[in-house]
Image: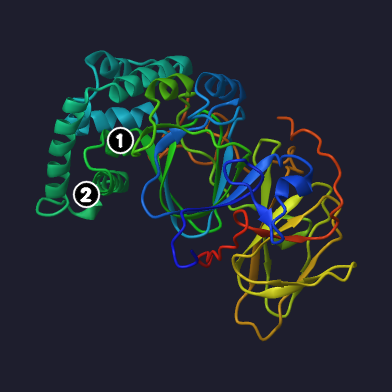
Amino acid sequence: DPDSPYAELWLGTHPSGPTTLRDGTTLESVVGGQLPFLFKILSAGKALSIQAHPCKDGAKRLHLENPTNYGDDNHKPELAVALTPFEAMCGFRRLEEIAILIKKHPEFAACISNEAKLAIFLCSRDEDDKKKALRMLFQSFMSCPVETSQVQLKKLLKRLQKEQSVDHVHPHEEPPWERKCARAILRLAQQFPGDSGAMAPFLLNYLLIAPGESFYMAANEPHAYVAGEIIECMACSDNVVRAGLTPKFKDVDNLVNMLTYSMGGPTINAGTPAYGDDRIMRYTPPTGEFEVMIITCNPGEDITLPALSVPAIFVVLEGSGNTDNEEGQRLVMRPGRSYYMPEHCPQLTLAVNDSKRGPLKIALAHENQHLDEPTLACAEDSKQWGGEFALPAPTSNPGTPRSPNKYVGVRELNLKPGVTVPFKVPKL
């Protein structure tokens, strides 16, 4: 239904949402197998679940034990590029931050065992000890009896609502992270009444990502997307281990056991110019299955897309224009249209008439061609952002070969079998 809102647009060959061409041919049959990546546009009207995605070994085990809820055996690292201001909880806070929040919020502390709190307060500077203490804390919080957590959540909300109104201190007297934490909890509790996952901002970094900025979530790292629109690209999988803020299947034990318990947020990166042209911004994760490029063509300009030896998919984000190539293929670009480019496709040249009032922007995804030059890193690796307090801190196989196919030109895609659904993406 073109008039209905959509939370996600999928472009790829995953069996849970296979893409088709306009003639009804499945993308998988055109590619000659599975693409190693899944490309998405995501629009979060309210918070998505507290979740993590398994590593390859974990995915195989989960699929074997519970194929109903874990429908494939692949890992699912993912990259996100913000299209609008985007709110997300990503990775655990540092222990120093969590310790302050435990002291400040007795309702949160009441949901954690004394042993877990002592482990936090008495933890040494050793990284392994910190991870053990954090795991004990998270396991204790997630296993808190529902009766206790709901009572404490009600008390917390009542106090925070009062502080945000009558007793609210002057903004200069309260650190920004405290205000952000309180407001996030009130908002999450309104969306998911009675769910103790509303207290997740006490445990996870709460980030605001600006349009054009990106971050990478590796396997076994906790996160929850709260609001806004993003481009997502990930390994071809739909495995999600959830623990809160959702009516869907929750698997707390597996989530607790699978996490790395790394602390600090992911790298926040605005991309890097590629192919000698600053109109082509590259977003490259440290995994072989995918990377993303955002390509901008201004009115009166033209730009030639890079030659690729691997299949690619691109979607028009904004503006209008046209393309040509040496084969005489001419395509009209409109927002929401998506196209498949087979490997060794003749190069396309985008052009925008100088009478247009804005640029043409497309997002292009393909197998990672710059694995040795990543622009993004996960929480365990070196990063540019070290937590909301900024406290001082003491390569995979890109996929299996695919059989050659007869398509050599760009093909327009449908979003689901037999139906083309227009999808309007907010402007960057």
Secondary structure beneath label 1? helix
The percent coordinates of residue 200 (x first, y second) are 32, 36
Write down the residue under mark 2. 173
Determine which quarter of the picture holds residue 317.
bottom right
**Neighbour tally class for label 2: few under 14, some 14-19, many 20 plus, Cα within 10 Å:** few
Write down the residue under mark 1. 197
Query: Is 321 positioned to the left or the right of 2 in the image?
Result: right
**Neighbour tally class for label 1: few under 14, some 14-19, many 20 plus, Cα within 10 Å:** many
Residue drawn at point x = 87 percent, y = 71 percent: 328
Query: Is 49 positioned to the left or the right of 72 in the image?
Result: left
The percent coordinates of residue 259 (x first, y second) are 47, 24
Q: Amino acid at mark 1?
A: Gly
Secondary structure beneath label 2? helix
Query: Is 8 positioned to the left or the right of 120 in the image?
Result: right
73 over 374 or under it: above or below? above
Visible in this render: residue 281?
Answer: no
Query: Is 382 positioned to the left or the right of 137 in the image?
Result: right
Q: Nearer the viewer, residue 72 or 121?
A: 72
Q: Amino acid at mark 2?
A: Glu
Compute the Cα span from label 2 to label 1.
Answer: 28 Å
107 over 360 or under it: above or below? above
The percent coordinates of residue 247 (x first, y second) are 34, 38
Q: In the displayed image of the protein, which residue is found farthest to the left?
A: 166
